[in-house]
Image (cartoon, grey):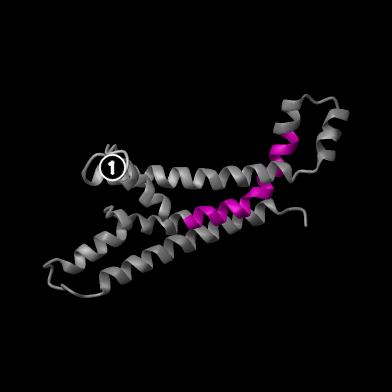
Amino acid sequence: MIQLLIIYYFPGLVLHNPIWGGGEAGRFAAASVAFIFNYSCYFSEIYRGGIQGVPVGQQEAGLVLGMTKSQIFFKVTLLQMIKRIVPPMSNEIITLVKDTSLARIIALQEIIWAGQAFMKGSNGISGQIWPLFFTAVYYLIFNGLLTVLLGKLEDKLNYFR
């Protein structure tokens, strides 16, 4: 959340140069950049940990078999790394979906904002809580589907116990 605020407000307040522009397009660009920076750092650490988690003996075995370094990486290390990084990557993907609701901090028009706008509108059910309830149900269903799909992927890759 703090990254989102810094990315959006810092250039305008400190540098006196609002680089994101105005309106919804500027807020969307700032939110996208904040999420990209934040999650690319997490993902790079997951990849690094996955590569370093493959035992050195696997690379030595590849060298004994006469493989080049690139063959060792793509045919030995990468395949084992993918199996190791799926659980933390699944966690970060689900967290990213949930964090998109934080984009509301800079008033980005997204699902929660639309639900609140609908509540305040004059559609005959002004003031009702149902739009936010359906927003919560949407997040629940979407995260549930992601959890099931990523869980199946983890089970498929977990062929050695």
In the rendering, at what x and y percent does residue 87 appear?
62, 55
| Residue at screen point 50% across, 47% down | 39
Q: Indicate whether residue 93 is drawn in magenta.
A: yes
Asked if residue 6 is positioned above or below residue 148 in the image, the reply reads: above
Q: Examine the image and state in which quarter residue 58 appears.
A: top right
Q: Nearer the viewer, residue 16 or 38?
A: 16
Quarter of the image where the N terminus is located: bottom left
Q: Say left or right for 63 vs 52.
A: right
Q: Indicate whether residue 51 is drawn in magenta.
A: no
Q: Nearer the viewer, residue 92 or 26?
A: 26
| Residue at screen point 37% across, 68% down | 137
In the rendering, at what x and y percent does residue 56 appear?
81, 39
Q: Examine the image and state in which quarter residue 18 appears.
A: top left
Amino acid at circle 1: Gly
**Badge 1 local density, few (<14 within 10 Å), some, or many (20+)?**
some
Which residue ends up furthest to the bottom in the rendered image?
128
Q: Say left or right for 148 vs 87.
A: left
Asked if residue 83 is positioned above or below residue 151 in the image, the reply reads: above
Q: Nearer the viewer, residue 4 or 160?
A: 4
Q: Which residue is mark 1?
A: 12
| Residue at screen point 82% across, 32% down | 62
Prevalent SS, magenta region: helix
Q: Say left or right for 81 vs 113.
A: right
In the rendering, at what x and y percent does residue 36 appear?
45, 43
| Residue at screen point 13% across, 68% down | 123
Quarter of the image where the C terminus is located: bottom right
Q: Look at the numbered disc 1 and give the secondary structure of its residue.
A: helix
Asked if residue 160 is positioned above or below residue 68 in the image, the reply reads: below
Q: What segment carries the magenta color? A: 75-95
Q: Examine the image and state in which quarter residue 48 appears.
A: top right
In the rendering, at what x and y percent does residue 139 appear?
40, 63
